[in-house]
Amino acid sequence: MLIRYLVQSVILVTLGVILGNIIAETNILSRLTPVIKPLCRASNLPEECIISLLTTLVSSTAGKSELAAFYRGGAITGREALITTVMGTFPVVLGESLMRVQAPLAIVILGPVVGGIYILLNLFSAFIQTIWALIYSKVVLNPRAISAENSRSERMSMTRETVRKGLKASYSTLKKTIPLLVITIVLVGFLLDHGLMDIISGFFDPLLRFLGIPGECAAALAGQFIHYSVGYAVLGSFLAEGVITRKEAILTLLIGSMIVISLIYLRYSISMYISLFGRLGLRIAVINYASSMVAKLITIGLVLWLM
């Protein structure tokens, strides 16, 4: 599992950095002006940030790597990079729900009611993160000039020379990024396999007790450590047998997602952000994690209020 993710991360980070540097060397952005211009005006973010947001719909790692390439190249500021990563939460969750079939699996295994509500709550949690990042960027950032459309010859300026420059710039970045990424992922993976996971689970135990979640649901939480579909299957069987209510199932899924997010940040995200953005990466990781936890707690509060 660790080796597979490590290889996947290295490939996606490499592709993202190369893509970002090639885009920085060309006029490709001018061809996308009709698409990104409204988003730039709505957020006060530069075109490069919007391009990376669109990329995260396909691959979160590639989109963030692309963003890091723009940041290291001086095209965007650290604040703009930070805001963009928070704002990208909804595109990431939307893309993962659709492209990694999480939504169909949840609906099939948990049933259309519980599965549908859970997927919508996940999207809601991600959406409010994107919204408050959008509001913050609109308040604190000054509008940037949006490039006008260029001539046809300028828009088609993907030449061997620009690609060569992009690859050259990528090499200097990847030479520092990839070793740090590999070392950190392996180190944190070792710690998680030797007791750190128990500490994380214990951290959320008071929340489980506070919400009155039945002890049987601990099996579903343990299943989510293995794969989200395992957690779905355990809860699906509990629902079918009447062991837990729909509300308890949804609360368990939301708490489980908080634990999984914590593990993902410790095992992968922190190392990726630091390797991509340097010292800024730790700040990005902390703020994104805090944003995710607050959004999940708001969502849990909504469930307690309405169900």
Image: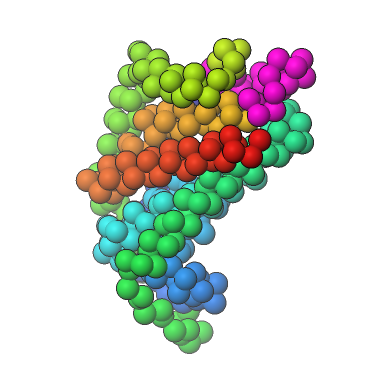
Quadrant holding the C terminus:
top right
Q: Position of residue 148 (x, y in %)?
A: 44, 84
Q: Is residue 278 left or right of residue 197?
A: left
Q: Is residue 10 left or right of residue 101?
A: left
- Please say if 243 is above or below 30: above
Residue at the spot x=37%, y=56% of the render? 83
Residue 270, located in which quarter of the rendered image?
A: top left
Q: Nearer the viewer, residue 23 or 42?
A: 42
Is residue 82 visible in the rendered image? The answer is yes
Residue 263, located in which quarter of the rendered image?
A: top left
Q: Residue furthest bottom?
A: 151
Q: Is residue 91 magenta?
A: no
Q: How many marks?
A: 0
Q: Nearer the viewer, residue 28 or 258?
A: 258
Q: Position of residue 156 (x, y in %)?
A: 49, 77
Query: What segment is highlighted magenta in the picture?
Result: 220-249
